[in-house]
Image: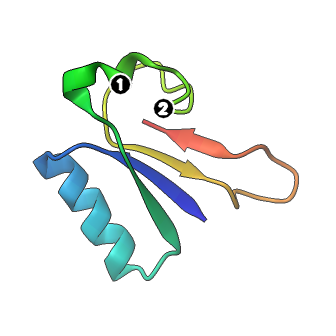
Amino acid sequence: MIDLFFATSPNVYKVSIALEEMALDHRLIAVDLSKGEQHNAANLAGANTHKVPVIIDHQAGRWRDPFTRP
């Protein structure tokens, strides 16, 4: 399962479309930029850039923790 943290922007749409086209199992999680939710580490799963989109792949491998990519 892949989590996609998103707000409305062209870059996020591109990632969302790519996940759909690759038929990958994913979940969309909204981030409200007007409330500053991008600065809450829990909302972006520890992404240090405080930007969306953020992707977390929970099935990165049996021997690894979930993989985060800002």
Give the camera-side residue of 34 and 10.
34
What is the x, y in percent for residue 50?
A: 36, 21
Q: Are marks 2 and 1 in contact (CB under 8 Å)?
A: yes
Q: Position of residue 34 (x, y in %)?
A: 19, 24
Q: Amino acid at mark 1?
A: Gln
* SS at circle 1: helix
Q: CA distance from mark 2 to mark 1?
A: 7 Å
Residue identified by numbered label 1: 38
The disc labelled 2 sits on which kind of residue? Asn
Q: Nearer the viewer, residue 30 or 53?
A: 30
Residue at image x 77%, y 59%? 61
Observer-nearest residue: 38 or 68? Answer: 38
Q: Which residue is mark 2?
A: 43
Name the image quarter holding the N terminus: bottom right
In x, y percent, where is residue 63?
A: 88, 51
Residue 50 appears in the figure: no
Look at the image and name its color scheme. Answer: rainbow
**Residue farthest along the right direction in this orientation:** 63
Q: Is residue 6 visible?
A: yes
Occupied quadrant, residue 45:
top right
Per the image, label 2 sits on a secondary structure element best described as loop
Sequence-earlier tag: 2 or 1: 1
